[in-house]
């Protein structure tokens, strides 16, 4: 995880997280800080392991998860979908962090796909991110259940 540790400490990564945090200050729904990103990483990795999918080393799964909502602040600012904005922002960070072209392509593809839950042509890593994204949410004690588009009674069940 050496490359990933370097990446998450980089000023560019930290700056994106800080912009999102500033724009989500008044948000009543789930926020997209590091706690969310790390929860998605752990759940997505467990999900892939359980399915005996060994195509993605842990560092690749964690990289995709820790970068998947990087474009949130762009969406708040311009309306551009955060999955594509995040994929664009992630690419130079991955390159600077020492990920090669093949690794970077797997990660960037999964970031682009992370809102396409249940669609057929999504990569296994993209699917894992999309599922983990929902399963990472703690809806039980949330005061915004009634107006949240993500909320359904199944969100109160245990997943991972
Ligand atoms: Fe997202
Ligand atoms: Fe997310």
Image (cartoon, rainbow, N blue to C red):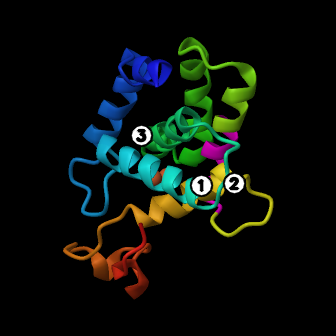
Residue shown at 38% from the left, 87% from the top: 153
Residue that badge 2 annotates:
124
Q: Is mark 2 within 8 Å of ligand 2?
A: no
Q: Position of residue 116 (x, y in %)?
A: 65, 61
The residue furthest bottom is: 153
Residue that badge 1 annotates:
48
Residues packed near mark 2 inside 10 Å, few (<14), some (14 to 19) or many (20 plus): some
Numbered disc in front, either 2 or 3: 2
Residue shown at 48% from the left, 38% from the top: 74
Front one among 32 and 9: 9
The residue furthest right is: 121
- Figure check: 88 above or below 61: above
Magenta span: predominant SS is helix
Residue shown at 47% from the left, 59% from the top: 133
**Is residue 80 visible in the rendered structure shown here?**
no
Local secondary structure at mark 1? helix
């Amino acid at each position: 995880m050496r490359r990933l540790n370097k990446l998450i400490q980089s000023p560019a990564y930290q700056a994106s997280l800080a912009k999102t945090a500033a724009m989500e200050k008044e948000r009543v729904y789930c926020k997209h800080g590091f706690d969310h990103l790390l929860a998605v990483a752990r759940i997505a990795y467990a999900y892939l392991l359980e399915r005996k999918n060994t195509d993605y080393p842990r560092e690749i799964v964690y990289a995709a998860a820790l970068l998947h909502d990087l474009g949130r602040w762009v969406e708040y600012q311009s309306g551009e979908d955060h999955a594509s904005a995040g994929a664009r922002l992630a690419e130079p960070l991955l390159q600077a962090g020492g990920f090669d072209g093949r690794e970077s392509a797997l990660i960037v593809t999964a970031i682009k796909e992370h809102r396409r839950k249940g669609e057929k042509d999504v990569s296994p890593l993209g699917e894992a991110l999309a599922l983990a994204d929902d399963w990472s949410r703690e809806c039980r004690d949330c005061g915004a259940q009634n107006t949240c588009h993500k909320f359904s009674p199944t969100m109160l069940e245990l997943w991972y």
